[in-house]
Image (cartoon, grey):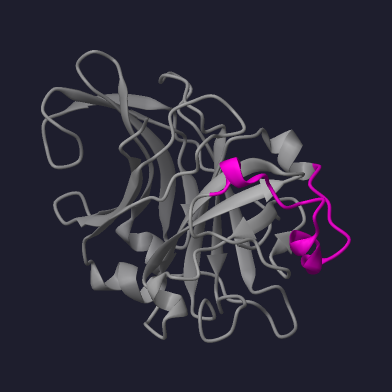
């Protein structure tokens, strides 16, 4: 959750690397996007393809130093810091247009659920121009019939309650049965975003504490019956730390 506000960029060109390590799979190819400075490190997107050129994963890499030197809000200032990541220029096209990374330095509502420092990773299926045109009268608009997507576009078990509409982003649908809504600590979760009844993004959210623990996490993604735009969407997602490369990876997998 949160909204796109500013972005920092670093002059790092799109690259392609062949890998046979844990990052990819044997004989897979990784296409990477331009790096963006966050904290003392950097972040960039990647697309992994198999031997036949099929896309097997889409994700974001955070170097370990991203978690050091993260910005904090001045008194009375906005506690959210936003960054824009482009998709790899030379890689295959996917349903993802770009990625917005929001550093939520004090978390966000609802209280006792997501009010801890964390990152939101918005994998947008619409352009940056389209995101900039997302407007709401207020947060409660997400509960309006004018914004509620048809049942076939909403994953089973998800709801889009009032209070989750964010300008220049979308309205957020959550899974009330997720652990963080069952009085368990928030580590990682998966959210869907909509605007004018159509999907605008899919969003893994990961707490700072979980990233710092360098734990490994993978979970299935509840999928809707249909999507607003044709393409391959994730059936699972993963949060991991690669000790050899000193990077965190937030990955959409099982694309179909």
Q: Is residue 70 above or below residue 148?
A: below
Q: Is residue 173 above or below residue 51?
A: below
Residue drawn where x is 42% and y is 27% of the image: 14
57, 117: nearer the viewer:
57
Residue drawn where x is 38% and y is 74% of the image: 179
**Residue 4 in sight from this viewpoint:** no
Instruction: Please provide percent x and percent y for residue 58.
Output: 38, 36
Residue 139 lies in magenta, yes or no?
yes
175, 138: nearer the viewer:
175
Instruction: Please provide percent x and percent y for residue 107.
Output: 55, 76
Instruction: Please provide percent x and percent y for residue 143.
Output: 75, 63
User: In the displayed structure, does residue 103 sit left or right of residue 49?
Assistant: right
Residue 201: quadrant of the picture: top right
Q: Is residue 95 above or below residue 180?
A: above
The quadrant of the image that shows the C terminus is top left
Which stretch did the figure color magenta? 133-154
Q: Residue at the top extreme?
A: 52
Magenta residues, dominant SS class:
loop
User: In the displayed structure, does residue 123 sit left or right of residue 241?
Assistant: right
Residue drawn where x is 35% and y is 33% of the image: 255
153, 206: nearer the viewer:
153
**Residue 209 in sight from this viewpoint:** yes
Residue 81 lies in magenta, yes or no?
no
Residue drawn where x is 47% and y is 63% of the image: 39
The quadrant of the image that shows the N terminus is bottom right
Instruction: Please provide percent x and percent y for residue 225.
Output: 50, 38
Q: How many marks?
A: 0
166, 197: nearer the viewer:
197
């Amino acid at each position: 959750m949160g909204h796109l506000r500013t972005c920092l960029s670093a002059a790092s060109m799109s690259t392609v690397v062949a890998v046979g390590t844990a990052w990819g799979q044997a004989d897979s190819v990784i296409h990477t996007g331009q790096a963006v400075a966050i904290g003392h490190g950097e972040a960039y997107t990647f697309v992994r393809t198999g031997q036949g050129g099929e896309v097997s994963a889409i994700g974001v890499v955070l170097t370990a130093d991203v978690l050091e030197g993260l910005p904090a809000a001045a008194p009375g200032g906005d506690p959210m810091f936003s960054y824009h990541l482009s998709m790899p220029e030379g890689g295959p096209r996917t349903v993802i247009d770009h990625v917005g990374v929001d550093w939520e330095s004090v978390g966000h509502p609802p209280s006792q659920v997501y009010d801890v420092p964390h990152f939101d990773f918005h994998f947008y299926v619409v352009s940056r121009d389209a995101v900039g045109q997302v407007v709401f009268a207020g947060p409660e608009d997400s509960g309006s019939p004018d914004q509620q997507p048809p049942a076939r576009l909403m994953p089973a078990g998800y709801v889009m309650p009032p209070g989750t509409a964010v300008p220049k982003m979308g309205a957020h649908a959550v899974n009330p049965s997720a652990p963080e809504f069952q009085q368990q600590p928030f580590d990682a979760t998966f959210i869907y975003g909509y605007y004018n009844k159509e999907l605008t993004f899919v969003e893994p959210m990961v707490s700072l504490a979980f990233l710092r623990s360098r734990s490994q996490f993978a979970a299935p993604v509840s999928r809707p019956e249909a999507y607003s735009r044709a393409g391959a969407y994730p059936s699972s997602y993963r949060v991991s730390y690669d000790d050899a490369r000193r990077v965190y990876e937030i990955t959409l997998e099982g694309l179909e």
